[in-house]
Amino acid sequence: MKQLHFVVAAATMLCHTALAQPQITRSNVNTTNFESEFYYAPADGLDVGEAGIEQVWDFSSLDLMYLGTDVTLPVSATPYAATFPTANYCYKYDGIFGQTGRYYYHTITPSKYEILSIAWNGTAGDNYNPDPRTFMVFPYNLNDSYTDTYKSTDDMVEKNVVATYDAYGTVIMPFGTLNNVIRQKVVTDGVTDYIWFNVEPFYPIVQTVFAENSLGIVKNTTPLGIENPAERTFSIAPNPTSGAFSIASEGFSDGSEISINNALGQSVAVQKIAAMSETVTLNIQDQPAGLYFAIITDKQTSVKHTQKIIKQ
Protein backbone atom coordinates (compact mmCIF):
# COMPACT_ATOMS: atom_id res chain seq x y z
CA MET A 1 0.00 0.00 0.00
CA LYS A 2 2.98 2.33 0.47
CA GLN A 3 3.20 3.25 -3.21
CA LEU A 4 -0.43 4.33 -3.19
CA HIS A 5 0.73 7.42 -1.32
CA PHE A 6 2.21 8.51 -4.65
CA VAL A 7 -1.25 8.64 -6.14
CA VAL A 8 -2.33 10.96 -3.39
CA ALA A 9 0.78 12.99 -4.09
CA ALA A 10 -0.48 13.50 -7.61
CA ALA A 11 -4.03 14.25 -6.63
CA THR A 12 -3.95 18.01 -7.09
CA MET A 13 -2.65 19.12 -10.45
CA LEU A 14 -3.45 21.14 -13.55
CA CYS A 15 -6.26 22.58 -15.72
CA HIS A 16 -6.23 22.64 -19.53
CA THR A 17 -8.59 23.51 -22.35
CA ALA A 18 -9.72 20.36 -24.12
CA LEU A 19 -7.78 19.65 -27.32
CA ALA A 20 -7.89 16.81 -29.82
CA GLN A 21 -4.36 15.99 -28.64
CA PRO A 22 -4.04 17.27 -25.06
CA GLN A 23 -0.94 19.16 -23.95
CA ILE A 24 0.05 19.92 -20.36
CA THR A 25 1.82 23.20 -19.49
CA ARG A 26 2.82 25.08 -16.35
CA SER A 27 0.07 27.64 -16.90
CA ASN A 28 -2.51 24.90 -16.25
CA VAL A 29 -1.44 24.22 -12.67
CA ASN A 30 -4.17 24.78 -10.08
CA THR A 31 -2.62 25.20 -6.63
CA THR A 32 -5.44 26.99 -4.82
CA ASN A 33 -8.66 25.02 -4.44
CA PHE A 34 -8.47 21.43 -5.69
CA GLU A 35 -10.20 18.87 -3.45
CA SER A 36 -10.56 15.15 -4.05
CA GLU A 37 -11.47 11.76 -2.62
CA PHE A 38 -9.04 8.87 -2.71
CA TYR A 39 -10.02 5.23 -3.29
CA TYR A 40 -8.36 1.82 -3.47
CA ALA A 41 -9.26 -1.07 -5.79
CA PRO A 42 -7.59 -4.42 -6.53
CA ALA A 43 -5.84 -4.60 -9.90
CA ASP A 44 -6.94 -8.16 -10.75
CA GLY A 45 -7.85 -8.48 -14.42
CA LEU A 46 -7.29 -4.80 -15.27
CA ASP A 47 -7.02 -4.30 -19.03
CA VAL A 48 -4.64 -1.39 -19.62
CA GLY A 49 -5.38 -1.35 -23.35
CA GLU A 50 -3.14 -0.09 -26.13
CA ALA A 51 -1.04 3.02 -26.72
CA GLY A 52 -2.24 5.59 -29.24
CA ILE A 53 -5.01 8.09 -29.88
CA GLU A 54 -8.74 7.98 -29.07
CA GLN A 55 -8.54 4.96 -26.78
CA VAL A 56 -11.42 3.84 -24.51
CA TRP A 57 -10.61 2.35 -21.10
CA ASP A 58 -13.61 0.78 -19.36
CA PHE A 59 -12.95 0.62 -15.61
CA SER A 60 -16.62 0.81 -14.66
CA SER A 61 -16.53 -2.54 -12.83
CA LEU A 62 -13.75 -1.57 -10.40
CA ASP A 63 -14.53 -2.42 -6.78
CA LEU A 64 -13.81 0.90 -5.06
CA MET A 65 -12.99 1.31 -1.37
CA TYR A 66 -13.00 4.86 0.02
CA LEU A 67 -9.77 5.77 1.85
CA GLY A 68 -9.63 9.53 2.45
CA THR A 69 -9.57 13.11 1.18
CA ASP A 70 -7.07 15.69 -0.10
CA VAL A 71 -7.47 19.43 0.52
CA THR A 72 -5.19 22.16 -0.87
CA LEU A 73 -3.64 24.49 1.75
CA PRO A 74 -1.42 27.58 1.59
CA VAL A 75 2.16 26.44 2.19
CA SER A 76 2.66 29.10 4.86
CA ALA A 77 -0.29 27.70 6.84
CA THR A 78 1.16 24.19 7.10
CA PRO A 79 3.29 22.86 9.99
CA TYR A 80 6.34 21.75 7.97
CA ALA A 81 6.78 24.72 5.63
CA ALA A 82 10.22 25.44 7.09
CA THR A 83 11.36 21.91 6.26
CA PHE A 84 10.52 22.50 2.59
CA PRO A 85 11.42 26.17 1.96
CA THR A 86 11.24 25.86 -1.85
CA ALA A 87 7.65 24.53 -1.80
CA ASN A 88 5.02 26.66 -3.53
CA TYR A 89 2.18 24.14 -3.36
CA CYS A 90 0.90 21.83 -0.61
CA TYR A 91 -2.11 19.73 0.27
CA LYS A 92 -3.14 17.66 3.26
CA TYR A 93 -4.34 14.05 3.19
CA ASP A 94 -6.70 12.69 5.85
CA GLY A 95 -7.40 8.94 5.72
CA ILE A 96 -9.99 6.80 7.45
CA PHE A 97 -7.41 4.34 8.82
CA GLY A 98 -5.44 6.74 10.99
CA GLN A 99 -3.30 8.40 8.29
CA THR A 100 -4.50 11.90 9.14
CA GLY A 101 -2.49 15.09 8.89
CA ARG A 102 -0.12 13.89 6.15
CA TYR A 103 1.35 16.70 4.04
CA TYR A 104 2.47 16.70 0.40
CA TYR A 105 4.86 19.50 -0.56
CA HIS A 106 5.73 20.40 -4.16
CA THR A 107 7.73 22.88 -6.23
CA ILE A 108 6.27 23.95 -9.58
CA THR A 109 8.30 25.93 -12.13
CA PRO A 110 7.68 26.82 -15.81
CA SER A 111 9.54 23.66 -16.88
CA LYS A 112 8.96 21.09 -14.16
CA TYR A 113 6.64 19.76 -11.43
CA GLU A 114 8.65 18.27 -8.53
CA ILE A 115 7.55 16.34 -5.44
CA LEU A 116 9.34 17.30 -2.23
CA SER A 117 7.42 15.05 0.17
CA ILE A 118 4.77 12.33 0.29
CA ALA A 119 2.62 11.68 3.39
CA TRP A 120 4.98 13.70 5.59
CA ASN A 121 4.12 14.27 9.25
CA GLY A 122 7.50 15.33 10.59
CA THR A 123 8.74 11.85 11.49
CA ALA A 124 7.18 9.53 8.88
CA GLY A 125 6.63 9.63 5.14
CA ASP A 126 8.97 10.37 2.23
CA ASN A 127 11.27 13.40 2.07
CA TYR A 128 12.94 13.67 -1.34
CA ASN A 129 15.23 16.61 -0.55
CA PRO A 130 17.80 17.61 -1.66
CA ASP A 131 17.01 16.04 -5.06
CA PRO A 132 13.21 16.24 -5.55
CA ARG A 133 11.23 13.61 -7.43
CA THR A 134 10.10 14.73 -10.91
CA PHE A 135 6.39 14.21 -11.47
CA MET A 136 5.86 16.17 -14.70
CA VAL A 137 7.78 18.22 -17.24
CA PHE A 138 6.33 21.12 -19.26
CA PRO A 139 5.18 21.18 -21.97
CA TYR A 140 4.07 17.53 -22.13
CA ASN A 141 2.77 16.18 -25.45
CA LEU A 142 1.81 12.81 -26.90
CA ASN A 143 4.88 10.52 -27.13
CA ASP A 144 7.01 12.82 -24.95
CA SER A 145 9.20 11.07 -22.34
CA TYR A 146 11.30 12.18 -19.41
CA THR A 147 13.73 10.37 -17.11
CA ASP A 148 14.35 10.78 -13.39
CA THR A 149 16.32 9.29 -10.52
CA TYR A 150 15.26 9.72 -6.91
CA LYS A 151 15.44 8.34 -3.37
CA SER A 152 13.84 9.38 -0.11
CA THR A 153 14.49 9.38 3.61
CA ASP A 154 12.14 6.40 3.87
CA ASP A 155 13.70 4.43 1.00
CA MET A 156 17.36 5.17 0.33
CA VAL A 157 17.57 2.82 -2.66
CA GLU A 158 17.80 4.99 -5.78
CA LYS A 159 14.99 4.51 -8.32
CA ASN A 160 15.36 5.07 -12.08
CA VAL A 161 12.24 6.16 -13.98
CA VAL A 162 11.21 6.65 -17.62
CA ALA A 163 7.76 8.24 -18.00
CA THR A 164 6.06 8.44 -21.43
CA TYR A 165 2.79 10.08 -22.48
CA ASP A 166 1.72 7.19 -24.71
CA ALA A 167 -2.06 7.51 -25.22
CA TYR A 168 -5.18 9.59 -24.81
CA GLY A 169 -8.92 8.95 -24.96
CA THR A 170 -11.85 8.20 -22.62
CA VAL A 171 -11.99 6.52 -19.20
CA ILE A 172 -15.22 4.99 -17.87
CA MET A 173 -15.26 4.88 -14.06
CA PRO A 174 -17.89 3.58 -11.60
CA PHE A 175 -18.71 7.23 -10.81
CA GLY A 176 -18.88 8.49 -14.41
CA THR A 177 -17.27 8.83 -17.84
CA LEU A 178 -14.27 11.13 -18.28
CA ASN A 179 -13.30 12.31 -21.74
CA ASN A 180 -10.01 13.82 -22.92
CA VAL A 181 -7.86 11.64 -20.67
CA ILE A 182 -4.13 11.05 -21.15
CA ARG A 183 -2.17 7.95 -20.14
CA GLN A 184 1.38 7.93 -18.84
CA LYS A 185 3.49 4.76 -19.03
CA VAL A 186 5.91 4.71 -16.08
CA VAL A 187 8.83 2.26 -16.08
CA THR A 188 10.68 2.15 -12.74
CA ASP A 189 13.79 -0.03 -12.70
CA GLY A 190 12.24 -2.17 -15.45
CA VAL A 191 8.78 -2.49 -13.83
CA THR A 192 5.90 -0.98 -15.83
CA ASP A 193 2.89 0.82 -14.35
CA TYR A 194 0.39 3.33 -15.76
CA ILE A 195 -1.30 6.56 -14.71
CA TRP A 196 -4.46 7.93 -16.37
CA PHE A 197 -4.88 11.71 -16.00
CA ASN A 198 -7.99 13.79 -16.48
CA VAL A 199 -7.21 16.89 -18.56
CA GLU A 200 -9.76 19.46 -17.41
CA PRO A 201 -9.15 19.84 -14.56
CA PHE A 202 -5.92 17.86 -14.71
CA TYR A 203 -5.52 15.23 -12.00
CA PRO A 204 -4.65 11.51 -11.82
CA ILE A 205 -7.74 9.33 -12.11
CA VAL A 206 -6.14 5.88 -11.85
CA GLN A 207 -2.62 4.69 -11.03
CA THR A 208 -1.56 1.05 -11.14
CA VAL A 209 0.80 -0.53 -8.60
CA PHE A 210 0.90 -4.01 -10.12
CA ALA A 211 3.62 -5.20 -7.72
CA GLU A 212 1.05 -4.80 -4.93
CA ASN A 213 -2.01 -5.77 -7.03
CA SER A 214 -3.34 -2.29 -6.26
CA LEU A 215 -4.96 0.69 -7.93
CA GLY A 216 -5.09 4.21 -6.54
CA ILE A 217 -8.13 6.17 -7.71
CA VAL A 218 -8.87 9.89 -7.37
CA LYS A 219 -12.31 11.45 -7.70
CA ASN A 220 -12.45 15.22 -8.21
CA THR A 221 -14.81 16.90 -5.71
CA THR A 222 -14.01 20.54 -6.58
CA PRO A 223 -16.48 22.04 -5.95
CA LEU A 224 -18.25 19.50 -3.78
CA GLY A 225 -21.51 18.95 -5.60
CA ILE A 226 -22.42 15.57 -4.15
CA GLU A 227 -22.43 13.92 -0.77
CA ASN A 228 -18.96 13.44 0.66
CA PRO A 229 -18.50 9.76 1.62
CA ALA A 230 -16.34 10.84 4.54
CA GLU A 231 -19.42 12.44 6.09
CA ARG A 232 -21.48 9.22 6.06
CA THR A 233 -20.67 6.85 8.88
CA PHE A 234 -22.37 3.88 10.49
CA SER A 235 -22.14 2.33 13.93
CA ILE A 236 -21.25 -1.23 14.94
CA ALA A 237 -22.17 -2.76 18.30
CA PRO A 238 -20.73 -4.45 20.15
CA ASN A 239 -17.23 -3.64 18.88
CA PRO A 240 -15.01 -5.46 19.81
CA THR A 241 -17.21 -8.51 19.37
CA SER A 242 -16.95 -12.21 20.14
CA GLY A 243 -19.02 -13.03 17.05
CA ALA A 244 -22.47 -11.47 16.65
CA PHE A 245 -22.87 -7.72 16.10
CA SER A 246 -25.34 -5.24 14.63
CA ILE A 247 -24.74 -2.52 12.04
CA ALA A 248 -26.91 0.60 11.92
CA SER A 249 -28.02 0.73 8.27
CA GLU A 250 -30.39 3.70 8.38
CA GLY A 251 -29.72 6.15 5.53
CA PHE A 252 -28.36 3.60 3.06
CA SER A 253 -30.29 2.63 -0.07
CA ASP A 254 -32.46 -0.50 -0.03
CA GLY A 255 -30.48 -3.39 -1.46
CA SER A 256 -27.11 -1.96 -0.42
CA GLU A 257 -24.62 -4.70 0.41
CA ILE A 258 -22.70 -5.23 3.63
CA SER A 259 -19.50 -7.27 3.31
CA ILE A 260 -17.29 -8.28 6.22
CA ASN A 261 -13.70 -8.65 5.02
CA ASN A 262 -10.67 -10.01 6.84
CA ALA A 263 -7.27 -8.30 6.84
CA LEU A 264 -6.38 -10.05 3.56
CA GLY A 265 -9.39 -8.51 1.83
CA GLN A 266 -11.33 -11.79 1.73
CA SER A 267 -15.08 -11.59 2.30
CA VAL A 268 -16.21 -13.78 5.20
CA ALA A 269 -19.85 -12.63 5.43
CA VAL A 270 -22.26 -10.79 3.11
CA GLN A 271 -25.77 -9.46 3.64
CA LYS A 272 -28.15 -7.10 1.84
CA ILE A 273 -29.89 -4.19 3.57
CA ALA A 274 -33.64 -4.83 3.44
CA ALA A 275 -36.25 -2.15 2.80
CA MET A 276 -37.08 -0.05 5.89
CA SER A 277 -34.31 -1.79 7.83
CA GLU A 278 -32.56 0.23 10.55
CA THR A 279 -30.14 -2.47 11.69
CA VAL A 280 -28.52 -5.56 10.20
CA THR A 281 -27.16 -8.39 12.36
CA LEU A 282 -24.18 -10.49 11.28
CA ASN A 283 -22.05 -13.15 12.93
CA ILE A 284 -18.35 -13.97 12.49
CA GLN A 285 -18.14 -16.34 15.46
CA ASP A 286 -16.41 -19.01 13.36
CA GLN A 287 -13.68 -16.61 12.18
CA PRO A 288 -10.31 -16.25 13.93
CA ALA A 289 -9.66 -13.32 16.25
CA GLY A 290 -8.24 -10.19 14.64
CA LEU A 291 -9.02 -7.12 12.56
CA TYR A 292 -11.96 -7.09 10.13
CA PHE A 293 -13.64 -4.43 8.00
CA ALA A 294 -17.36 -3.83 7.56
CA ILE A 295 -17.89 -2.39 4.06
CA ILE A 296 -21.27 -1.04 2.98
CA THR A 297 -21.59 -0.56 -0.78
CA ASP A 298 -24.43 1.88 -1.36
CA LYS A 299 -26.65 0.55 -4.14
CA GLN A 300 -27.55 4.02 -5.40
CA THR A 301 -24.09 5.65 -5.48
CA SER A 302 -21.79 2.56 -5.65
CA VAL A 303 -19.62 4.28 -3.02
CA LYS A 304 -18.12 2.12 -0.28
CA HIS A 305 -18.24 3.10 3.40
CA THR A 306 -15.87 1.30 5.76
CA GLN A 307 -15.54 0.75 9.51
CA LYS A 308 -13.14 -1.45 11.49
CA ILE A 309 -14.30 -4.43 13.57
CA ILE A 310 -12.22 -6.23 16.19
CA LYS A 311 -13.02 -9.94 16.64
CA GLN A 312 -11.96 -11.13 20.09
Image: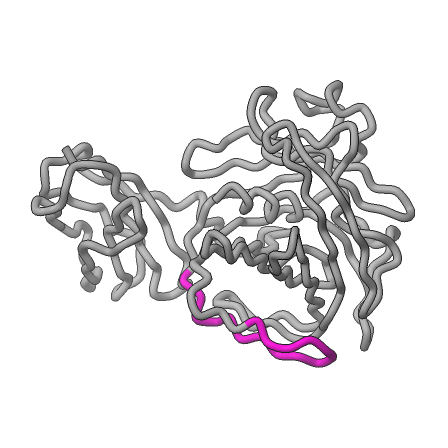
Across the whole image, how many numbered discs are drawn on residues? 0
- Quarter holding residue 45: bottom left
**Residue at position x 48%, y 71% in the image:** 60
> Quick check: can you spot residue 73?
no
**Residue at position x 66%, y 20% in the image:** 79
**Residue at position x 55%, y 58% in the image:** 208
The segment highlighted magenta reads 48-63
Q: Is residue 229 left or right of residue 167?
A: left
Q: Is residue 118 left or right of residue 255?
A: right
Q: Nearer the viewer, residue 275 or 97?
A: 97
Q: Is residue 57 magenta?
A: yes
Q: Is residue 253 left or right of residue 15?
A: left
Q: Nearer the viewer, residue 21 or 51?
A: 51
**x, y percentage for residue 129?**
75, 28
**Residue at position x 25%, y 43% in the image:** 292
**Name of the residue lying farthest toward the right:** 110
